[in-house]
Amino acid sequence: MSERDGKVHGCQIEGDDGFEFDSLEEGTRNYSLLETTPWLVDSFGRRIKNVRISVTDRCNFRCIYCMPAEGLEWLKREQILSFEEIERLAKILVRMGIQQIRLTGGEPLVRHEIVNLIARLHRIEGLQSLSLTTNGVLLKDLARPLAEAGLTRINVSLDSLVQDKFFKFTRRDALYRVLEGLEELEKYPQISPIKINAVALRGFTESEVAGFARLARRKPYIVRFIEFMPLDAAQIWEREELLTGDELRELIEREVMPLVPIPRDDPADTATRYRFADGLGEMGFINPVSHPFCSTCDRIRLTAEGALRTCLFAHHETNLKTVLRSNSSDEVVAETIRRAVWKKEMKHHINDGAAFKRTTKTMSQIGG
Ligand code: SAM
Ligand code: SF4
């Protein structure tokens, strides 16, 4: 069967550059789309609207579900994309239909002059949302400059509200600085909503749900639990040990109050949202393992060293840095991106037993 036959079921296709597509069991590739749409689409017809750009692989925390305590080798300055390169790529991507940019890392706020990058990206015409994922420890000083530079949304990672458990999660004694950073953020309503993301670990998180639920009711924060994914340096992740979003939701309903589902306004949203029954406060559950959302995925990722990843769990990256640094025109860069996105993986294989092969990179190296 040739690539141009339109529908391809249950077979493997070798791309012309030697990259192998995933085996398709359920999916249907629509080959006519690549030539007929101006947008960034993959071969399953998913339109890509969202890019996560990692600005550094470095971090001032060492979360147990992400980085090793020590021993990760940092990229050198010249290996990571400059602000000029990131801005150029962002402009090209927005012209291709990207609507949302989220900066991440490593810890994005440790990148020198990050506020300057936010200001540059904020000026890109057509960009609808500019957001940041941060561990929050530098927010007390940076909330104001970030707001003034044009940041519109933020996710703050916070896994525990108990000081010694926070230390166990992050290997840093910084809970109060993160809470202070969150308080500071509240002064800048132009950054809204403020979302808190907590990675759920069995044996750690169950006793925290009531505290997080109370925080979501008391403060203007949307608290979301994220299922632990096999992207940790220490490889402690085990399928059988997964603490699922459904379990956490049941705990909250039992310990705090029933939750009422909020209809999804964008099918590509990663979180299932709920409001407390009395209308006060919102919680969310991001369940990539127990309820994968690959079929509606509209995301791609750019690593700090300029590699395009079309899936968190990808084994293949497209080196955009080399293309950028070889005097290529914007058209050539765009075509390289288009061809890479076309081959976006159908789904992750975490639930497929031996078919799942971990990537060698940690979340901090990919940019979560
Ligand atoms: N340093 C920033 C932070 O922690 O928010 C941004 C980078 S971090 C890699 C992005 C997100 O990935 C954070 O919300 C973090 O909790 C999440 N994360 C890291 N490792 C994870 C894992 N193994 N499973 C699920 N989420 C993970
Ligand atoms: Fe750093 Fe974020 Fe990874 Fe924690 S999750 S080690 S804060 S990159």
Image (cartoon, helix red, strand yellow):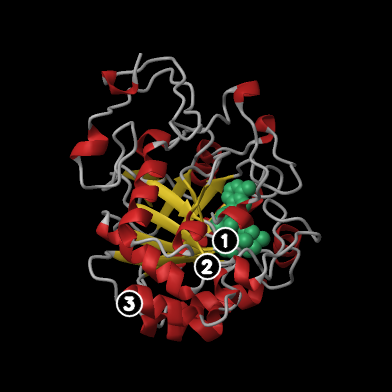
Residue 82 versus residue 340 in the image, above or below: below
Q: Quadrant of ligand 1?
A: bottom right
Amino acid at dot 1: Glu
Q: Kindly identify the residue that appears in the image at 23 percent across and 30 percent down.
A: 32
Q: How many numbered marks are there?
A: 3
Q: Position of residue 327 (x, y in %)?
A: 42, 65
Q: Kindly identify the residue that appears in the image at 68 percent across and 71 percent down.
A: 60
Q: Position of residue 213 (x, y in %)?
A: 50, 56
Of badges 3 and 2, the one in the foreground is: 2
Compared across the picture, whether 24 is left or right of 231 comes to: left
Amino acid at dot 3: Gln
Residue 193 visible in the displayed image: no
Rendering quarter of residue 349: top right
Question: Disc 1 and disc 3: Cα gap in Å?
Answer: 31 Å
Q: Which mark is residue 190?
A: 3
> Which residue is labeled 2 in the image?
81
Q: Quadrant of the C terminus?
A: bottom right
Residue count near mark 1 (Cα–Cα under 10 Å), binned few <14, some 14–19, many ≥20 = many
Residue 237 visible in the displayed image: yes
Residue 144 versus residue 204 in the image, above or below: below
Compared across the picture, whether 364 is left or right of 42 comes to: right
* 3 or 2: tag closer to the N-terminus: 2
Q: Which mark is residue 208?
A: none
Rendering quarter of residue 159: bottom right
Q: Position of residue 19 (x, y in %)?
A: 50, 33
Label pair 2/1, CB-CB below 8 angstroms:
yes
Amino acid at dot 2: Leu
